[in-house]
Amino acid sequence: MIAAAADVISGARRPLIMLGAAAARPRCTHALSEFVARMRIPFFTTQMGKGTVSGCTDLYLGTAALTEGDYLHEAIDQADVIITIGHDTVEKPPFTMHSRGQTIVHLDYQPATIEEVYVPQVEVIGDLHTPCTPSQTGWMARCPTPKRCSRCVKASSRTSPTGRPKIG
């Protein structure tokens, strides 16, 4: 499933990350902060996920609620992939996911509870800290967003089209 999630994310043109309540665990916050910074994917939180990753970044879109027509919901409507990290349907749903056409990737320590408002197409189940830690194999070893990834962009700016280091 990690490979399937990486494929979906790497093919996304307008991905978003949604951080839910289970992402707000102390052991996860540092790894998730690094993950968001590395992937350069805009993110928003649910009301219970607020504070998981600092909002002091240009990637933070805000906290979602069941409202309509605001800039955050416009971004959600335009997203083609939404990566939900730590979302549980016991939370007030930040938006209704049926019939919007996005691919939902569920990343959590437990399987998704499938309901009318939450139907992920891809699930990665496990310790939230592990798949978001850059040193781990699998998820981060295969960078799912090399065009947005700060490390990949820096590395490619130091090499020529042939892959050799640039001089000067």
Image (cartoon, helix red, strand yellow):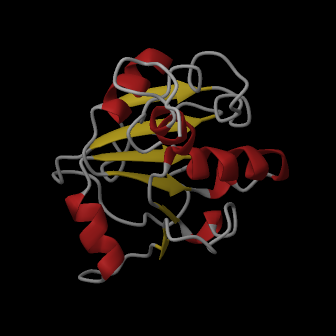
Q: Nearer the viewer, residue 145 or 52?
A: 145
Q: Give residue 112's position: percent from left, percent from top.
A: 49, 36
Residue 119 placement: quadrant: top left
Q: How many marks?
A: 0
Q: Residue at x 61, y 44 (%)?
A: 35
Q: Give residue 31's position: percent from left, percent from top.
A: 73, 44
Q: Residue at x 68, y 53 (%)?
A: 33
Direction from residue 150 to residue 95 in the image, left or right: left
**Residue 118 appears in the rendering:** yes
Direction from residue 139 to residue 127 in the image, left or right: right
Q: Nearer the viewer, residue 147 or 34?
A: 147
Q: Nearer the viewer, residue 68 or 134?
A: 134
Q: Residue at x 44, y 76 (%)?
A: 65
**Residue 1 appears in the rendering:** no
On screen, residue 10 above or below 138: below
On screen, residue 70 above or below 24: below
Q: Give residue 28's position: percent from left, percent from top.
A: 76, 46
Residue 69 placement: quadrant: bottom left
Q: Give residue 19's position: percent from left, percent from top.
A: 56, 56
Residue occupying the far right of the picture:
26
